[in-house]
Amino acid sequence: MKGVRLVSGSPTYPAAGRESDPQRPGQLDGATMRHISMDDDEYPIVRALSSEGELDPSLDPGLSLEEVVHLYRHLVLTRTLDQRLVLLQRQGRIGFHVGSLGEEAAIIGSTYAVRETDWIFPCYREFGSALLRGLSLQKFMDNMFGNANDTVKGRQMPDHYTCREKCWGSISSPVGTQITQAVGFAWGAKIDGADTATLVYFGDGATSTPDFHSGMNLAAVFKVPTLFFCRNNGWAISVPAEKQTASRTFAEKARAYGMPGVRVDGNDLFAVIAVTRRARERAARGEGPTLIEALTYRMGGHSTSDDPDRYREHAELTPWAQQDPLQRVRNYLEKRGAWRASDEAAWVAEIEAQFKRAVATSESTPPPDLGSMFDDVYATLPWHLLEQRVQLFEGPRAPKLH
Ligand SMILES: Cc1ncc(C[n+]2csc(CCOP(=O)(O)OP(=O)(O)O)c2C)c(N)n1
Ligand SMILES: [Mg+2]
């Protein structure tokens, strides 16, 4: 299996093959990285936590040590599950997985920074956000197997979980569609006088969709409380960020619509929390939306259907591995005597045990009832669907593939 290597103890990245290419543009903490501009004077990258785990007091979001440990455990949970789910897909037991390797801090930090009553409109890489909000591992796995207990009744691909009871919407795989939905929802909440904001996740590639532009425009005009969170992970499948836009940054697109745009180091849990909280406070004051561009890097393939070695040098991963968002928080905790390798090994073992149990349950749960695919759209089924329903039960059945 390419790209993923399981290790015991702290989950880490796969080892990079070669030295980084010194010709790549941009610098972040001395590392050379592919991205559109890394050094824009007008849109500097907000950074609170150094690679060594030193926190800049002027950007300290004021988390207690317990909170940092809690969030670090979620970072570890996210990465461990990502690695396990890829293995499960390679074994042919689930059909697909789209992961967040390298982007964990951007996702966990931003979700943690908003209120639990704020609605989240995810893209498709944010299972860590859903688990942080309270989606159970069992429900997540039921969706990965599309079984009878799956909230979306097996009608979707794996990784299309949802968690309405935790104000967490449904996955949007058509790129960008969640953006206008998030704006419409927040606008409705504003009209109702509710102090509710929406946090919408999307990638650098989604900034090329009409939904991004219409969502940004409407939100700015009507001062809608939406936080536009762009995970700039360098790639839209095989299209690099520098081919996605002629702008120097994604954040500066905010200016054209009349809202603030901010660039944050997406591998910095603390800076992501600080910046997202600031945007949330602005929304609460009635001042409207903010565009946040989180600079990070997609350390894995686009999904399990992708082989990134076909279009990018493995060496490109090296500088980003040195900015591993988990390692940086681990360094912070270690400096404060709040991290021990033995504790982490125990957490990972616990996660793996829970994962195995959840998978065993989901895998042995039968698929949704065949006829259920006709439910939930019409109050009364029209004649042609009634006819199709009968024909469906008459067969023939395709053989089970996995
Ligand atoms: C409307 C639409 N066009 C194309 C696709 C195929 N597609 C799926 S993900 C993706 C790339 C999106 O990249 P980005 O927005 O940067 O998000 P990332 O995957 O990097 O998180 C594309 C083109 C799609 N799902 N929907
Ligand atoms: Mg991307």
Image (tube, rainbow, N blue to C red):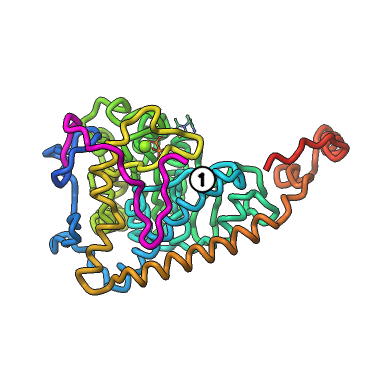
Q: Is residue 252 visible?
A: no
User: In the displayed structure, does residue 353 sit left or right of residue 328?
Assistant: right
Q: Nearer the viewer, residue 235 or 363?
A: 363
State left or right for residue 258 relative to residue 374. left
Q: Is residue 70 among the parts visible in the rendering?
A: yes
Tell me what residue is drawn at x 27 percent, y 54 percent: 272
Tell which residue pokes out farthest to the left in this image: 41
* Residue 347 falls in image quadrant: bottom left
Q: Residue 232 appears at what percent x and percent y?
A: 31, 40
SS assignment at label 1 = loop
**Rendered image quadrant of residue 348:** bottom left
Which image quadrant: the C terminus? top right
User: Residue 388: x, y in percent?
Assistant: 82, 34
Q: Amino acid at mark 1?
A: Ile
Q: Is residue 15 magenta?
A: yes
- The residue at the point 76 percent across, 46 percent down is 379
Q: What span is in magenta?
A: 1-27
Residue tagged 1:
171
Quarter of the displayed picture in which ligand 2 can be seen: top left
